[in-house]
Amino acid sequence: MENKVLRSCLIVIVAIALLGLTFLGGFAVGSLFPADQFKQTLGIATNPSAQTTPLPTPLAGEPTQIVQATSPEELEELFRPFWESWDLLHENYVDQPLDDLALMRGAISGMLAATGDKHTSYMDPDEFAQANAEMEGEEYTGIGAWVNITGEYVEIVSPMKGSPADEAGLRAKDIVIAINGEDMTGTHGDLALQKILGPAGEAVTLTIRRGEEILDFTIVREIIQVPAVDYEMLEGDIAYIALYTFNELTTAQLRNALKELLAQNPKGLIFDLRNNGGGYLVTAIEVTSEFVSSGIVMYEEYGDGTRESFKAQPGGRATEIPLIVLINEGTASASEITAGAIQDRGRGTLIGVTSYGKGSVQNWIPLRTEDGGVRITIARWLTPNGNQINEVGLTPDIEVQFTEEDLDADRDPQLDAAIEFFNTP
């Protein structure tokens, strides 16, 4: 009787996860942690409903066709091998009792992983709450870095400015291969991330692979207030704005920064999107619209080849001022949407190095039966000229490297190049 009830509950969970794709409309481009990862999500907008992913055939050997369960009876038949495995595990596994909640969550994770898409995955209640807290601009406890948890290891997308991760010296593209001396080989990214997070005031040691180097960083966790905007007037009447994320606070803070800076009549504006791990799609469109006055700023392309276009919103505050955008390998997701639109529309000049290359669209769906959720890739986004960014990144108009020697000497050649651009007759 208990197994029958449990089976019914799990089937309901699977069905709700699939139906959620059809009836829920909050679309996001993920991170990274920060994205993806955490992170790297992109936002809430209304869109055509996503299509359910075809279910694989349960038959042995190579599947000859895609099989979909379209009725409760077909779904029950499809899951017979699953329940047989469930029973065999409970009857034979050496360490009893088994944690059925963990098995259920593992089953959902495996189902989503079977799509082969690294950005389609399950988040347990703690991970889902943590990710949403960051995107809502709230406080959370950790080291202060956007990360990608969808690869073989956790990857740093970008450290947050002034965070423990930033001050310790973590960089974009750093790979976390061990945590507190424990090898993370074969450990799921979600589980590795939980080991990085922890109480404020406690230290965590990350073993990082950076190119050919293996480095250890001991970082004391803090309560992190996710930053959004920093700005100032530079010498020579040049305005400077650094944008760190695309969360719920970003648009208002950016508009306030533009109001204050433009009132001082600068001759140009440097818009710094370096190490910006991304955020909400709706925020990306709002931010882009502050610099691009009209026209298409991005496309979403779906699996059937159809596209939906997103246009600039009227009323931008900085659509005429000469503009430089700084990008680097930590510029990802929503920040690539903004930089790509500015580049394609000829609105400004990109300086730096090739960006991260996160250009797929995820729908974050809370599960109705628990506090966790799933993120499912439903589209890819393209720049106004139709350029694919995913796994490619944006190529700057002017390439300027930022070396380790520059960092050690407290130099910023990319920012210097932008200033020189405005000061050159």
Image (spheres, rainbow, N blue to C red):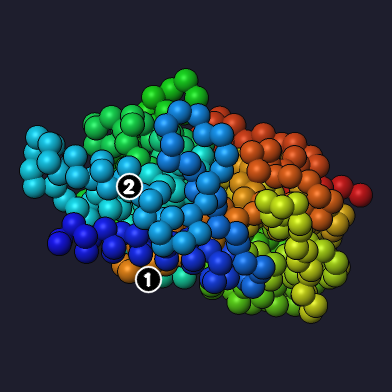
**CB atoms at circles 1 and 2 under 8 Å apart?**
no
Q: Residue at x 62, y 67 (%)?
A: 49
Q: Position of residue 101 (x, y in %)?
A: 22, 55
**Front one among 320 and 247:** 247
Q: Position of residue 129 (x, y in %)?
A: 36, 65
73 vs 403, left or right, is left
Q: Residue at x 47, y 70 (%)?
A: 136
Image quadrant assignment for residue 84: top left
**Front one among 74 and 186:** 74
Q: Earlier in the sequence, mark 1 or mark 2?
A: 2
301 vs 13, left or right, is right
For residue 80, the mark is 2
The residue that disc 1 covers is 368
Q: Quadrant of the N terminus?
A: bottom left
Q: Position of residue 86 (x, y in %)?
A: 23, 45
Q: Compared with residue 327, is residue 309 higher up or lower down, i.e. above or below?
A: below
Look at the numbered disc 2 and give the secondary structure of its residue. helix
Q: Compared with residue 80, is residue 294 higher up or lower down, i.e. above or below?
A: below
Residue 126, can we see it? Answer: no
